Amino acid sequence: MNQFTLSVLAFVGGVFLAIQGGLNAQLGVLLKNPLLASVIAFFSSSIFAIVIVLFSVKTFPTLNQLKEIPIYFWFTG
């Protein structure tokens, strides 16, 4: 990717990051439960990330490679 493309992606990502807080807050007000709003936002983001990974990753790790990963790495944010 060239510098212009990366700059545009960074800008768009920053805009969406700024918007996300306000949208999550509004969702929490509408649901009358901010924790539920956080769970919904996390779930929808997870689904989006899974779809992107399924379409962009060419090879997946083998079961043996996954077993070699220390357990504490599976709980990092």
Image: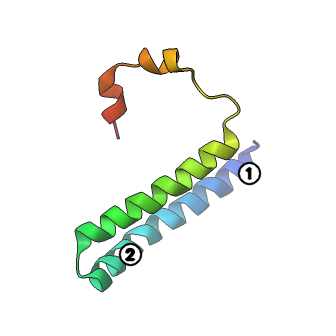
As shown in the figure, which amino acid type bears the numbered disc 2?
A: Gly
Dot 2 alpha-carbon crowd within 10 angstroms: few under 14, some 14 to 19, many 20 or more: few
- From the image, which quarter does the C terminus lie in? top left
Residue 23 horizontal/vertical position (percent): 41, 76
Mark 2 and mark 1: Cα distance apart in space: 28 Å
- Residue found at the far bottom of this picture: 30
Residue 12 horizontal/vertical position (percent): 60, 62
Where is 5 relative to 59, above or below? below
Where is 63 relative to 76, above or below? above
Residue 43 horizontal/vertical position (percent): 41, 59
The residue at which mark 2 appears reads as 22
Residue occupying image coordinates x 68% and y 42%: 56
* Nearer to me, 75 or 21: 75
Looking at marks 2 and 1 on the same chain, the residue that comes earlier in the sequence is marked by 1
* Nearer to me, 24 or 5: 24
As shown in the figure, which amino acid type bears the numbered disc 1?
A: Phe
Look at discs 2 and 1 and give the one toward the viewer. Answer: 2
Residue occupying image coordinates x 54% and y 50%: 49
The residue at which mark 1 appears reads as 4
- Residue found at the far front of this picture: 63
Q: Quadrant of residue 39?
A: bottom left
Where is 52 relative to 31, above or below? above
Q: Is residue 53 left or right of residue 71?
A: right
Dot 1 alpha-carbon crowd within 10 angstroms: few under 14, some 14 to 19, many 20 or more: few
Could you say whether the residue bearing mark 1 is in a helix, strand or loop? helix
Q: Is residue 47 left or right of residue 41?
A: right
Where is 58 relative to 35, above or below? above
Q: How many marks?
A: 2
Residue occupying image coordinates x 35% and y 78%: 27
